[in-house]
Image (spheres, grey):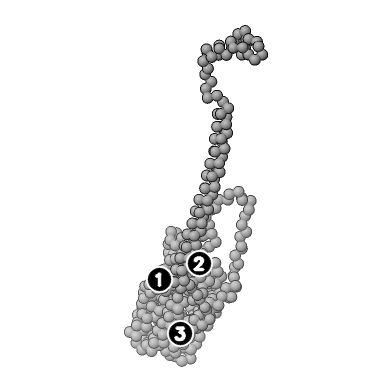
Amino acid sequence: MGGVAVDDGAPGVKAPDGGWGWAVLAGCFVITGFSYAFPKAVSVFFKELIREFGVGYSDTAWISSILLAMLYGTGLGLSLNFQPSLIMLNRYFSEKRPLANGLSAAGSPVALCCLSPLGQVLQYQYGWRGGFLILGGLLLNCCVCGALMKPLVAPMTKDLGDKGIEKKKVKPKLLDFSVFKDGGFVIYTVAASIMVLGLFVPPVFVVSYAKELGNEDTKSALLLTILGFIDMFARPTCGVIAGLKWVRPRCVYFLSFAMLFNGTADLIGSQSKDYASLVVFCIFFGISYGMVGALQFEVLMTIVGTEKFSSAIGLVLLMEAIAVLVGPPGAGRLLDATKNYMYVFLLAGCEVVLSAVVLATCNFLFIKKKPSAPADKLESITLTDDCNTKMCSNRAEGNDDEEKGEREEQEKMIKEEENKDNEGIDDVRPKSVTVDSQEVERFLKEPQPNGNMAASPETSL
């Protein structure tokens, strides 16, 4: 978990880090906004639900818990939008992935800033039933965002002579449980499950907390808007920081710090006694909550890589869904028993701080990074390789010179033999074929050894 897994993208497909990926990022922005903000925004209806049905806080807290559990663990409802959008975002971005995750996660506070006051207005105008109906209609816009999720296609390759040979494709598994063999993944899953026990408790109860202190409903709902506004800028900023060269290999410790910050904000916020102190709490909680939101899935991608991310996120969210079903209802039952919001925020803070300690400590003690070669060794290795390369090249040049010399000697020998043959032929042949006519007549008239005389030159020849 401490190191960075090499992310090669889909088989045969390199992450474009842009292009159509920006359209996919825009879709993820909207989907993440509705998926995370809707379960929190419905908390503005809790007072009316308690009044109409005569139930306690623990009963109304089941609404947000069930919505978040459906988002995380069931594969139904909001998760049909949320999980595929994260997987597609991971396919389209590699080098710019921390920034992309931060911008995508910023959709949650933007939507929360809009849905919280909108829900309050809808409650006054149409009641909680009409408000739920209109908010459900707004969620249908996620269908348009789903149309932007265009799958990446591997580039076409030309087959030269081996058209009949086809590579066997490995059929991907629906859930790859081999990720549990990775110790970093197990530590992350345990820490994340502990974290969500208390992470979503303050946004669910802060509006009711403000109303309990005697503030108006509209003024109380404004706290979620403040929280969302701060969260809106914290997420992309944290994404930029997480993408730095020095921070990205240590992003797991950065996430641990964000979790510790969030838990500490809960512990301090539990002592709030007026509206101003709740505003200050929402500011610091928004910063820490944005940091956690921007980093949690980036760290998971770093641990398991691209190939196993789809299975890893499904298994992690399944474990978190169990914790989400326990967290807010358990806090609501504690509120019903104590009638004091201080204990609810103290419990949430302790749970988040514990998750930060588990993540950082276990990663430091049990996950070992591969030792990297020092700079001087790398330089010596590089110099040695260069020397070896030069020696090999010199040897190769020497061998080439020797071969050229041998070839030249052979060519010289062949040429000398040809010259000798040509000289022998020249010696046999007369230097000149022209003869004087008087000498010919004189030769023909002279008596021959056989005693006969040629009658004429023609017959003699």
Q: CA distance from mark 1 to mark 3?
A: 26 Å
Q: Do the residues under discs 2 and 1 have CB atoms within 8 angstroms?
A: no
User: Which quarter shows the C terminus?
Assistant: top right
Residue type pointed to by label 3: Val
Q: Residues within 10 Å of mark 2 (few under 14, many from 20)?
A: many
Residue at left offset 58%, top offset 50% = 159
Residue at left offset 49%, top offset 83% = 361
In front of the other: 124 or 70: 70
The single residue placed furthest to the left in the displayed view is 276
In the rendered image, residue 402, in percent from the top left (x then y), is placed at 52, 51
**Residue 281 marker:** none
In the rendered image, residue 393, in percent from the top left (x then y), is placed at 49, 57
Q: From the viewer's perspective, is residue 351 above or below residue 104?
A: below
For label 3, the SS is helix
In front of the other: 255 or 142: 255
Describe residue 138's horizontal placement relative to residue 181 as left or right: left
Q: Which callout, 2 or 1, points at the residue further toward the start of the chain?
A: 2
For label 1, the SS is loop
The answer to whether residue 168 of the structure is visible from this angle is: yes
Residue type pointed to by label 1: Leu
Residue type pointed to by label 2: Asp
Q: CA distance from mark 2 to mark 1?
A: 17 Å
Residue at left offset 48%, top offset 73% = 372
Residue carrying label 3: 353
In front of the other: 230 or 261: 261
**Residue 244 marker:** 1
The single residue placed furthest to the right in the displayed view is 450
The answer to whether residue 47 of the structure is visible from this angle is: no
Q: Do the residues under discs 1 and 3 have CB atoms within 8 angstroms?
A: no
**Residue 7 marker:** 2
Q: Which callout, 1 or 3, points at the residue further toward the start of the chain?
A: 1
Q: From the viewer's perspective, is residue 359 above or below residue 21?
A: below
